Amino acid sequence: MVYTNGMSTEDIRDALKREPFEPFRIRVTSGDHYEVRDPLSAAMMKSRLFVALPHSDRSVFIPYLHIAAVETLNGSGHRARRKRRQ
């Protein structure tokens, strides 16, 4: 999933409610990006999105007007294990 330009708050809401949840990346107009790996780490507000950054006490508020794209993270952040040859 990649939403760009015509993206709405409904697209973000859908991404947060997707079952099973698929981690996604939010790209902003400044070029920065933020990963949402857990639906509980993001909250939709009236005019901006709150994102708690993983493994820290940091967070960001992203105005919807500055969201350039929402992209699904390939592989969902999980690494596939290779079978060992015997």
Image: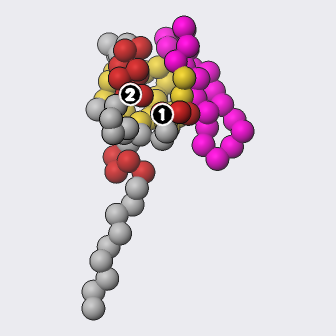
**In the rendering, at what x and y percent does residue 85 appear?**
27, 86
Structural crowding at the residue carrying mark 1, measured as other residues with C-alpha within 10 Å and reported as few (<14), some (14–19) or many (≥20): some
Closer to the chain start, of discs 2 and 1, is 2
Name which residue type carries label 1.
Pro
> Which image quarter is the N terminus in?
top left
**In the rendering, at what x and y percent does residue 21 appear?**
37, 38
View extreme (bottom): residue: 86
In this orientation, does residue 56 appear? yes
The quadrant where residue 59 appears: top right
User: Dots 2 and 1: beta carbons under 8 Å?
Assistant: yes
Q: Which residue is mark 1?
A: 39
Say which element carries label 1: helix
Q: Which residue is mark 2?
A: 17
Say which element carries label 2: helix
Coloration mode: secondary structure
Residue range of the region highlighted in magenta in the rendering:
44-66
The residue sitting at 41% across, 40% down in the picture is 23
View extreme (front): residue: 19
On the rendered structure, is 67 left or right of 20? right
Name which residue type carries label 2.
Lys
Towards the viewer: 71 or 41: 41
